Image: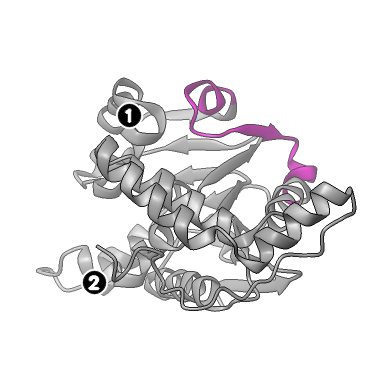
Amino acid sequence: MSVLIEVSDGIAVITIDRPSKLNAMDPDAYEAIGEAFLRIENDPDILVGIVTGVGHKAFSAGADLKEMHSDRPDDAGWEPWRPTRWDFGLGTSKPLIAAVNGYALAGGLELALVCDIRIASSSAVFGAPEVKWDLLDGYGAYRLPRVVGLSNAMDLLLTGRFIDAEEALRIGLVSQIVEGGALMQHAQEIAQTICANGSLAVRMTKELVQRGLDSSVEAHFRLMHMFYDRIDGSDSQRERLDSFASKRPSGRPSTSIPDQPNSLTEGSR
């Protein structure tokens, strides 16, 4: 298996396991990552996902270009390498954390950009070198400006240069740098903190942020009030507020969210 998924205590860890290829992704790996995102979304017992790569050299060096070039017909485009479910990670309602443990290049950087929180080892290297091969980084062109701002995004996308973890932290591509040996432990700690919060509030907050990036103020507040109506008076909310008022620890929030489609706003637009 080129991609592993392990689930424990509400946390799913997706690991790309192609260390001899710097965890570069072949079609099977792309498909497996998409399947893993679907599992995270559809399993009510999974609250948070963590994405990483095997070893200390690479998160993922992107697509396996040698295999792509040798396996596809001359007239085949890039799209057959991109299962529809590859983009599903951005649409999943559950938080995703990228634990970037080395090179995150091209499609590897795109995979990190799918995630909501990115933390990096001190040896991490980031880059969008597609222009060097006369390829397009279509997903990076969409996500990078929203993450690091227009000028920083243009710098990375048009020059194809690599940046280290310190520069990635400075421009906001990652939120923290962690020494390599503690990277996964810290990712788990972040995930555990999120799991301890109200699961419905976490999901709604993520969707509010995502949709707010591309919506008007009016549309954002309409969605916000719709979510308020949905969450107010929920069993989890009452239990948590009662616990706060009585200064007793609340129980772990229910992972069951009744009548929730994959997108919290599906069917209400």
Task: Give the x, y percent position of residue 145.
Answer: 32, 32
- State the residue in front, 187 or 218: 218
**Residue 5 occupies which quadrant of the picture?**
bottom right
x then y, percent, for residue 169: 56, 26
Q: Amino acid at mark 1?
A: Ala
Determine the secondary structure under disc 2: helix
- The image shows residue 268, relative to residue 189, as above or below, that is below
| Snapshot quadrant of residue 100 | top right
The residue identified by callout 1 is 153
Instruction: Report the amino acid beneath label 2.
Output: Pro
Q: Earlier in the sequence, mark 2 or mark 1?
A: 2
Q: Nearer the viewer, residue 268 or 109?
A: 268
| Residue ID at (66%, 68%) | 235
Residue plotted at (9% across, 69% down): 75
**Pointer 1 local density, CA inside 10 Å: few below 14, some 14–19, many at least 20:** many
Q: Is residue 176 magenta?
A: yes
Quarter occupied by residue 87: bottom left
Q: CA distance from mark 2 to mark 1?
A: 26 Å
Q: Which corner quadrant holds the C terminus?
A: bottom left
Please give the range of residues in magenta.
166-184
- Tell me: 102 left or right of 132: right
Q: Which residue is mark 2?
A: 80
Where residue 129 appears, as percent x and y from the top left, is 33, 39
The answer to whether any part of residue 215 appears in the image is no
- The quarter of the image holding the N terminus is bottom right
| Frontmost residue, 32 versus 58 | 32
User: Pointer 2 and pointer 1: residues touching (CB < 8 Å)?
Assistant: no
Helix, strand, or loop for circle 1?
Answer: helix
Q: What residue is shown at x 64% (from left), y 35% (from top)?
A: 123
